[in-house]
Image (cartoon, rainbow, N blue to C red):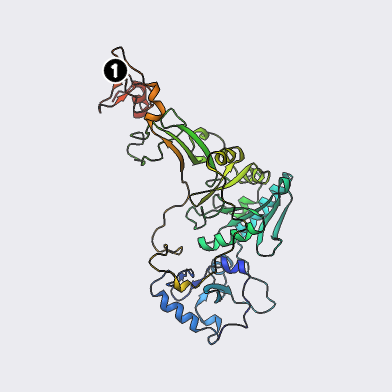
């Protein structure tokens, strides 16, 4: 018998609710038949069988956010939506929905709303979209009718849930900024995001304290792949920490989308702050993009050039929400990607570089080959890519000054 007498959370809250199986102390991934844990299929069958016959507070499911943030044990139960199981808080009719918000989360909302107001963009905390399917942490009224939603995310969530919540916002014509503090958060790249440091609420609430953007903000770069060019290193060359300058460039030409903190042209400049980013996004001066399934932000002038060369990003603001369609038991378990609730270390999602176009060194510089007095081509310096003046100890062409800089000791010739 289903739990018809219980009051489930709203659709969006169901999508965001993590759930923990208390006896094992493990978070469950309800998007998988095996829950992402050993013997998960048997556990899921047992949990389903408890519906309608075992009290909710005795089923072993609790909210990890309420445990970690509110220091309370709040039981949870399973809710079915078109063959997909989701977790809801146990609350009685008339009770208010339970908040996942920590003091740091509240501080971020208050700070962004106040900063936006101070720069001439009206902001409202906890505002619903016109169709009522999503609740925005901060709704910012931007330029030319643009509506910006600021969504700080400090707790663990699945990529599936984050994408579903983003679709709710796009259906309401909201341009969302998802702010993550964890560099390994499942939502990084899954939605238009920025990453900021994990700071205490007391620091966040002081407006004069800058909050740096660490990731999510990209720039478009076009350059020769040489030390004298605008790239820090070739996107195809693996980084060797023991030989950081060795084989770092291919001497070709690349057009890239690069995280701004990795862009050579931006080194030494002041950090982009969350306040500046939000204000510029509200003014339409920063635009979200999607490349190879990864979301990010570009300055408007870079985005215009990107669209001119690569075409517009597909508009899925009116796409159907497909999160709960179909019977999940018909999916092939072997073909399903790894769980968002993992035991093994996860690969960091941020800091990606996207190669838009590459041309080889021959294509770029075939007509500009320098020759010596005998008419022979002069080899290019391994460090700067210009015509070399001498062979190095490894037999590769180089300049004496380039070698000295690479060795890091003035006057020392390797």
Question: Where does residue 181 sit, x and y in percent of width and height?
Answer: 54, 53
SS for dot 1: loop
Q: Is residue 178 above or below residue 281?
A: below
| Left or right: 406 as drawn, with respect to 182 | left
Question: Where does residue 61 sit, x and y in percent of width and height?
Answer: 51, 76
Name the one closer to the observer, 67 or 240: 240
Q: Is residue 300 above or below residue 347?
A: above
Question: Where does residue 186 sit, x and y in percent of width and height?
Answer: 49, 58
Q: Is residue 356 above or below residue 322?
A: above
Which quarter of the image is occupied by the N terminus? bottom right
Name the one closer to the observer, 350 or 72: 350
Image point (60%, 57%), residue name:
104
| Left or right: 379 as drawn, with respect to 23 | left
Image point (61%, 69%), residue name:
11
Which quarter of the image is occupied by the C terminus? top left
Question: Is residue 210 visible in the rendered structure shown here?
Answer: no
Q: Pointer 1: residues within 10 angstroms few (<14), some, or many (20+)? A: few
Q: Which residue is under mark 1?
A: 376
How many marks the image carries: the answer is 1
Question: Is residue 201 visible in the rendered structure shown here?
Answer: yes
| Left or right: 241 as drawn, with respect to 263 | left
Question: Where does residue 45 sit, x and y in percent of width and height?
Answer: 45, 80
Name the one closer to the observer, 406 or 11: 11
- Looking at the rendering, which quadrant does residue 270 occupy? top right
């Amino acid at each position: 018998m289903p739990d018809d007498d219980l009051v489930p959370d709203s659709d969006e809250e169901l999508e965001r609710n993590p759930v923990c199986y208390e006896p094992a102390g493990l978070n469950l991934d309800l998007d998988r038949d095996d829950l992402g844990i050993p013997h998960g299929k048997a556990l899921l069958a047992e949990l389903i069988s408890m519906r309608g016959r075992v009290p909710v507070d005795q089923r072993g499911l609790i909210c990890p956010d309420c445990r970690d943030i509110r220091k309370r044990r709040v039981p949870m139960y399973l809710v079915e939506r078109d063959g997909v199981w989701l977790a809801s808080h146990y609350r009685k009719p008339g009770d208010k929905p339970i908040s996942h918000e920590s003091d740091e989360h509240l501080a971020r909302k208050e700070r962004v709303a106040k900063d936006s107001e101070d720069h001439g963009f009206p902001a409202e905390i906890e505002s619903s979209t016109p169709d009522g399917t999503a609740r925005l942490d901060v709704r910012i009224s931007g330029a030319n009718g643009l509506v910006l939603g600021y969504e700080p995310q400090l707790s663990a969530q699945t990529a599936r849930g984050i994408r579903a919540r983003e679709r709710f916002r796009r259906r309401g014509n909201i341009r969302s900024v998802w702010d993550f503090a964890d560099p390994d958060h499942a939502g990084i790249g899954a939605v238009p995001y920025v990453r900021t440091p994990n700071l205490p609420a007391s620091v966040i609430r002081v407006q004069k304290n800058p909050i740096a953007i660490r990731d999510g903000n990209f720039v478009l770069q076009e350059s020769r792949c040489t030390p004298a060019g605008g790239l820090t290193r070739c996107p195809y060359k693996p980084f060797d920490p023991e030989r950081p300058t060795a084989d770092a460039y291919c001497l070709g030409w690349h057009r890239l989308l690069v995280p701004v903190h990795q862009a050579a042209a931006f080194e030494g400049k002041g950090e982009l702050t969350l306040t500046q980013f939000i204000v510029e996004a509200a003014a339409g001066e920063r635009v979200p993009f999607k490349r190879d399934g990864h979301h990010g932000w570009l300055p408007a002038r870079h985005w215009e050039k990107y669209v001119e060369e690569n075409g517009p990003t597909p508009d899925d603001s009116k796409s159907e929400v497909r999160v709960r369609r179909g019977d999940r038991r018909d999916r092939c378990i072997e073909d399903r990607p790894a769980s968002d609730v993992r035991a093994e270390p996860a690969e960091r999602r941020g800091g990606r570089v996207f190669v838009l176009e590459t041309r080889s060194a021959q294509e770029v510089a075939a007509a500009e080959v320098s020759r010596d007095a005998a008419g022979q081509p002069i080899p290019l310096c391994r460090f700067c890519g210009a015509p070399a003046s001498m062979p190095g100890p490894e037999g590769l062409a180089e300049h004496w000054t380039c070698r000295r800089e690479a060795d890091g000791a003035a006057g020392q010739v390797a």
